Amino acid sequence: MALDQLTDDPQEKDMGFLDHLEELRWHLVRAAASVFIFSILAFLFKDVVFELILGPTNSEFWTYQQLCKLAELINSPALCLGDMDMIIQNRTITGQFVWHIKSSLVVGLVLGFPYTFWEIWRFVKPGLRNNEKSASRGVVVVVTFLFLTGVLFGYYIVTPLSFNFLYNYELSVKIDNIFDLSSIIGMVATLALACGLMFQLPVLTYILSKAEIISPKLMKRYRRHSIVVILIISAIITPPDVISQVLIALPLTFLYEVSIIISRRVEKKIAKQRA
């Protein structure tokens, strides 16, 4: 279908392929610039950034403190995970500088995500029909909220519990745990960003349902299969421990059920428009 059949904006009808390509380029440039600016700020404020990144390695971290308070409240000492004295080492001469840059880029991606998505949405939106624009109102807020919620969930829930499990896991008392800087930062970044992206499941479901690629009936039929896929994804992006996998799988399963409800509403709305 031609672009001028998809839009109600007269200005868009006059734009050719190269014009759209040029417009997309400038949207991407502005998005990249926002990530770059936030990355520079993160690079300059390294003390704050690395206090956050290395936070889950400290027994004073917020999550551990709250679990200890909960353990005291319900009289269940096992919930208080105990002290962590994690020794972190850097084994390459460029290691700290390289991971300073990589960490700054990750923080830049997270902080620049709302503006980046807004720029992409500004490019996509003119190509929608008026009713589609109305139906997608507030999408930037929803996508940003889900992404940041996922990042916070990965940082405050999945990461500290994973660290605690792996820190206390031992094959033999003769083996000392001395952790490499790259594995610590890599794990924090991977879990946080992965959770942020996976929390976009309801938005993806809305788009696919709108395009009539999936339906609530299809999602219900393959519910068991989806649970297996969620467990596999959780196993891939998390450390090799059951707790981390379950912690990611549970909210994803919940989001899958929410997505079925979203798909059902989209289907009803499409049927009503055709009636």
Image (cartoon, rainbow, N blue to C red):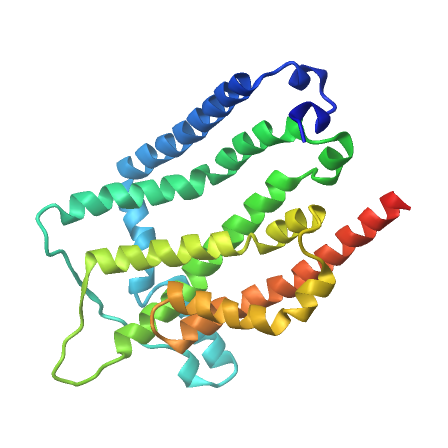
x, y percent for residue 20: 55, 21
In the rendered structure, the answer to whether residue 54 lies left or right of residue 217 reads left
Q: Residue furthest right?
A: 275
Image quadrant holding the N terminus, namely top right
Quadrant of the image occupied by residue 86: bottom left
Residue furthest to the left: 93
Q: Is residue 170 left or right of residue 224?
A: left
- For this view, does 5 lie left or right of residue 120? right
Say if 160 sits above or below 117 in the image: below
| Residue in view at x 37 percent, y 43 percent | 107
Query: Which residue is at the front of the view, 243 or 17?
Result: 17
The reply to whether residue 57 is visible in this rendering is yes
Asked whether, in this view, residue 229 is left or right of residue 269, the answer is: left
Q: Residue at x 36, y 63 (%)?
A: 61
Q: Give residue 166's position: percent from left, percent from top.
A: 29, 73
In this rendering, is residue 64 above or below 171? above
Which residue is rendered at x = 51% and y = 49% of the image?
148
